[in-house]
Image (cartoon, rainbow, N blue to C red):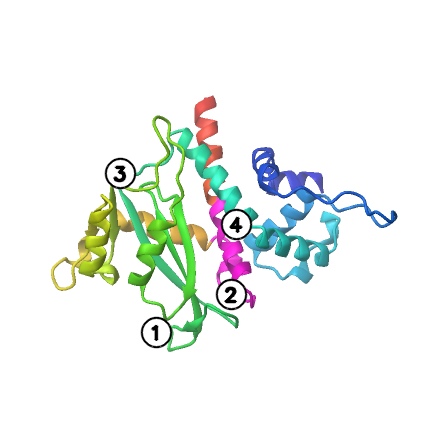
Amino acid sequence: MADLVERLVPEELWLSFRRVVPPTVGKRPQGGGRRRAGDREALAAIILVATSGCAWRQLPPVFGPSWQTICRRFAQWSRDRVWARLYRVILDELGARGELDWSRCAIDSVSLRAAKGPLTGPNPTDRGKLGSKIHLVCDRNGLPLSLGISGANMHDSQGLEPLVRGIPPIRSRRGPRRRRPAKLHADKGYDYDHLRRWLRKRGIRHRIAREGIDSSLRLGRHRWVVERTVSWLAGCRRLHRRYGRKAEHFLAFVGIAAVLISHRRLQAAGTSTTK
């Protein structure tokens, strides 16, 4: 079991997680009770659910805590925004190592079916079936910088401003923290003059495809990285379909997927530096 936990939660990820997780409550005043299940084992089980797409009840008992305990731990950490803070820590580490390329960022979204809950809506690309949408901005290397969720009926253009505002100030190898890309690439779904004015006002050069002018054959020259990031997100099978009712839990799984993507890049950077 220890090998499985270490494989799902490497030491570097565990150290980063310990920096952001709230402190655990001490012993109960009345005494007694069972010993608290380990956070690392619970985190490993949550990552297994995110990557495999299995239900909480299907978790193997090898992790130690019951599936009810792991589910409660996931809900508590989601309410405490642990996943967002963990992702921020990893982004800062990547920025400090110079692994983020702000010269050319891209924005896009992906829709998936949803069973129920808020932030759902009829998907116009799926015969009006209920669905949710994941919005993201990634850097030139495809690392997600900002993520959001909405109903599937929300137009892509409505997500641009919140996503760009949602990019956190990230550490740089030299100089102050940075949160604005030099360029932003987008497809024809963002072809609106007010978005271009909004980006120019913030010093961001826009590369938004124009309806009826720009050929669709050339749109992938710089936007393919965000399409690849969407496929990376799909590597977490829990994001193939939204089963949960609570929107914060769905956003938490999106955050976990982003954490795993960026942590793999951090591991690759550490390996290349060692060599």
First of labels 1, 2 by sequence position: 1
Q: Which residue lies furthest to the left in this view?
A: 213
Which amino acid does the dot numbered 1 rest on? Pro
Q: Which circle's residue, 1 or 3, is located before the other in the chain?
A: 3
Q: Looking at the image, which residue is at 39% across and 43% down?
A: 143
Magenta span has 258? yes
Q: In this view, does 242 lie to the left or right of 6?
A: left
Q: Is mark 3 on a helix, strand or loop?
A: loop
Nearest-to-viewer mark from 1 and 3: 3
Label 3 vs 2, first from the N-terminus:
3
Marks 3 and 4, the one that precedes in the sequence: 3
Cα separation, mark 1 vs mark 3, equals 33 Å
- Cα separation, mark 3 vs mark 4, equals 26 Å
Q: Which of marks 1 and 4 is nearer the N terminus?
A: 1
Q: Residue furthest top?
A: 275
Per the image, is 193 magenta?
no
Q: Where is residue 217 in the image (x, y as percent from the top left)?
A: 18, 56
**Residues rendered magenta in the picture:** 235-260
Q: Earlier in the sequence, mark 2 or mark 4?
A: 2
Looking at the image, is 201 positioned above or below residue 10? Answer: below
Say which amino acid is labelled 4. Ile
- The label shown at residue 256 is 4
Tell me if I can see residue 268 in this picture.
Answer: yes
Marks 3 and 1: in contact by CB < 8 Å? no
- The overriding secondary structure of the stretch rendered in magenta is helix
Q: Tell me the residue that label 2 is attached to.
A: 242
Q: Name the residue under label 1.
A: 124
Residue that numbered label 3 is attached to: 103
